Image (spheres, rainbow, N blue to C red):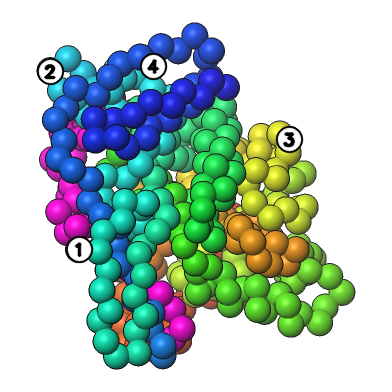
Amino acid sequence: MKRTITHLADGRELIYFDRRDDADRSAADRRELGPRPVASELRYDPLTEEWIAMAGHRQTRTFQPKGTAAECPLCPSAPGRDTEIPAYDYDVVVFENRFPSFSGNFGTYEDVGGLSEVRPGAGRCEVVCFTSDHDSSFSRLSEDQVELVMEAWADRTAELSAVEGVEQVFCFENRGSEIGITLAHPHGQIYAYPYVTPRTKLNLGAASRHKGPGNLFADVLAAERAAGTRVVTSNEHWTAFVPAAARWPFEVHVYPHRQVPDLPALTEAERAAFAPLYTSVLRAFDGLFGVVMPYIAAWHQAPVREGRDLAYLRLELFSIRRAPEKLKYLAGSESAMGAFVNDVLPEEAARMLRSQLDH
């Protein structure tokens, strides 16, 4: 793999990840861009003990251009049309988000009164372009391409974990207009948070209180593999299953068989085994109702400094679609109380997904 670092016209970092060592990445960004926005403002909620980012500059971010490659800022540049990627072709590209929720470009932050503490939204947000093919999707990537994306995820996790003030690195993909994507090109994002996220705190708290024979996550995996009814697919290194207490109509957790804290800790064999299993699950999602399935794919990694002995790398994939023309909305119970009601039995969801596997 060849890794090439360059910079965009406004100073943001861009990194090419190429399979070929002779890839030429000398093309420069010829655009004239305005100044970069200052970092968001973090405000502390004393009722939930959570940090909330106030990022007003994100209101101006690019929103659903015409949907063709000719208008897409994530496609390669072309003669007469400059995009976020200066090269005329690429394998995988990572660059700093132009409209970040967190960054190192600080502004002025004032006390807002009340019981809320205020501090800069220090950190970093990056965009990961999985392929230069505007009309592709993660499910259609070759195994080699998925491995290259994983190399990029691992590289960025290691690099961002070393940034001062970063406490957790989160790699994820949003797919589908129903989820709220603003750009259709196959891509994901990476957030480097200046705090440990609420979900991770809950998970690590549960793991610290676990009374089972081993690590909580390892015991969950072992129990699901033993039960079998909710396992969607597995191979030598990974198991994909619907959790017994799934919140979403179609939700699959993908666990490595070995406890590791984060993506950089995976072996070459584990990375290679992930690609065919995961893409088959994604294709099963699309096969359920014969429509493109909206989803969120979220990598849960250990925080940078705390709970690394308890954490267990895993990917959680879920969709808000519950039927061909029906979505799962987070209404009163879910949004106000955080109390989920699932419309699809996990065992039935697993059976339906298994029926769509293409192997």
Label 1 secondary element:
helix
Q: Is residue 274 above or below residue 193?
A: above
Residue at horizontal 31%, vertical 82%? 331
- Is 171 magenta? The answer is no
Compute the Cα span from label 1 to label 3.
43 Å
Label whose residue precedes the other's in the sequence (1 or 2): 1
Label 4 secondary element:
loop
Position of the N terminus, as image quadrant, is top right
Residue at horizontal 31%, vertical 51%? 105
Q: Provide the residue designation for mark 1.
A: 56
Is residue 211 among the parts visible in the rendering?
Answer: yes
- Is 54 magenta? The answer is yes
Label whose residue precedes the other's in the sequence (1 or 3): 1
Q: Provide the residue designation for mark 2.
A: 80
> How many residues crowd around disc 2 within 10 Å: few (fewer than 14), some, or many (20 or more)?
few
Q: What is the x, y in percent for residue 224?
A: 72, 67
Instruction: Please report the bounds of the magenta region as a residue range.
Output: 48-76
Contact? badges 4 and 3 (CB < 8 Å): no
Q: Is residue 106 above or below residue 149?
A: below
Residue type, numbered disc 3? Ala
